[in-house]
Structures are given as structure tokens and as C-alpha cells.
Image (tube, rainbow, N blue to C red):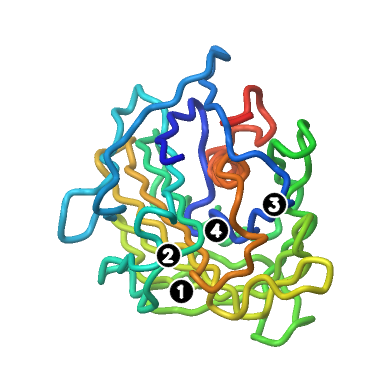
Amino acid sequence: MNCLFRCRNAVILPALILCSPAIYPAHEAHRFQASDAAGSARIVDYEAGLGPQPPCEKEPTPPYPSLEDSPLVKSWSASGFGRDWRPPACTGWTAVGFTTLVTTVARFRQVSDAEDLLHRIGAISTLAGVRYWSTTHSRWRTLVVDAYALSALQPGQRRKDFTPDELKEGNVLYFEQVDNLSGKAIYRMHIVKASPQHIVIDVENVSTMRYLFVPILHSGEMQSISFLDRESDDVWRYYSMVRTGKSANRLIAGNESSAVNRAVAFYRHLVGIPTDQEPPAAR
């Protein structure tokens, strides 16, 4: 299924959108529904022939919704063009294709400045306890068990959260995250752009991610990039894209609703909405 979700009141941490991969048992269904704030379900079809386009050099695809509308979260179909998809040059991604690909597009109110957003992004420890709706278990579950900044690439070099001063353009930082399925992994966070008007951050896994000791994602196979652009004094535009590489373990593919719910959980975390607020984006 190749559908576009309108997830009301859903928001996510910019660049860390799916650092926790969605792993699906082979029997889990591929069907899902999207719920708005009033609880009704709504699925919006979208012409996806050319794939996603972030807001660089061209108009974004999907386009930004209005400030009054819900954020748009789309899980793209790998069966259509996944193995041959070439990422836009501005992502910096060189590998072709994907197993899973999710975009989140929104406008949101932010009365404080870019430094406040950078502070939230750098507060890695606050990811611990982020929750999402598990379609497998039909209940809210903790997605991130623990998360912390690292002083170096090596594991165990735990330190305090990153400050906005450390999130300067061009800097590369590392953090470790423990999720409820794939366990502990180290991630690299690259500050591509950091100005009062624009923030661009990309993240990828450095260590191999495993499920029940089975490798599911090798280094660099989980990538995300997020673009935050100031539209006015109190409005920001948000575009986030996350993919797993086309050589990822087949356990990664299978259930679009779980991928969407994880994306929404991080998005809510950024803006300050409780991550387990009803209704979930997809059941």
C-alpha cells in the first residue's frame, strides 16, 4: 500500500525520526489506518511516481500542509521503485534504493528561536521513555529504553547532553540509543546546517543493529535527514526523510503502520506533545 497519512497533532524529533527501526514478524498484516484528533480514520491517496523530494533546489514532495492541517506522514512503497530510487543530491546519500522509506512534512508553531530547537535536538537523554503505538501488540509501548550522548565514537563514553554551542554547522557528534527491539546502537549525527533560519541534520547508524542476535542493519543502513526552515517569527516548516538500505534484513520490511507510528512518536517529542497521546497515527 502506498498511502499518505494525515496525522493530527503528530510531531517528531527532527533528524532522529526512525533511528529505532521497525521490525515486523512475518505474519504481521500490512493494512493500517490513520486517525485524526477526533478519532476518525482517514487514508489519503497520493501520486508517488517520482518519490520524495526534500525542500532543496525544488519544491518539496509531499508539499507542506497548512499550519491548521495535520502533519503528513507517508510510507513509500519499495515495490514500486525502491531498489532503483536515487536520493536527491542534497541529502548527501550516495547508495541507491531502500527497503523502507518514510517522510514527515509539517508546519508547526515555535515562538522561541533556532537555539531552542537545537537545545531540544541535543538533549539526547530526553528520548528515553518515548512511547509509540505497537500495531503488533495493540497497545502503547516504550520505544526508547535509554539514550545518551557520547564523548567519542567508542561505546561507554557517556556524557551530558549536547549544548546548542556544540551543534554548530559541520560538527559531527555521536550518541547511543537503546530501543525496545534492536537493542543498543551507536549513531552519528552530522550538523549539515545550523543558522537562525535553517537547520539540517542527518543521522545514521555506526554500529550494526541486531534483532535476537541476528544482524538486521549494518553500518550506514539506517539514515535520516531533517530540514527545519523558519517561515515567520512563530512558524517553522519541517521535512524529515528516513530510509533503511535496500540490503537491510527482510525483518525490517512489512508493516507500514509501525514505521509511521515510530515517526510520529519522535515528531511529537520535539514539539512537546505526549508521545502516547490518543489517538495513535495508525492502528
Residue 270 visible, this orientation: no
Q: Residue at x 75, y 58 (%)?
A: 179
Percent across and percent down for residue 21 are: 63, 58
Q: Secondary structure at mark 3?
A: loop
Badges 2 and 1: C-beta atoms under 8 Å apart?
A: yes
What residue sits right under mark 3 in the picture? 24
Check whether the beta carbons of the residues at disc 1 and disc 4 lie within 8 A of each other: no
Mark positioned earlier in the residue sequence (2 or 1): 1
From the top left corner, tell me how far across and down residue 12 is, in percent: 53, 45
In this view, 253 is above or below 262: below
List the residue tagged with mark 2: 201
How much space separates mark 4 and mark 3, taking CA atoms? Answer: 20 Å
Residue bearing the label numbered 1: 190
Say what amino acid the circle numbered 1 marks.
Answer: His
Between marks 4 and 3 in the image, the one whose residue lies nearer the viewer? 3
- Left or right, 8 with respect to 93, comes to right
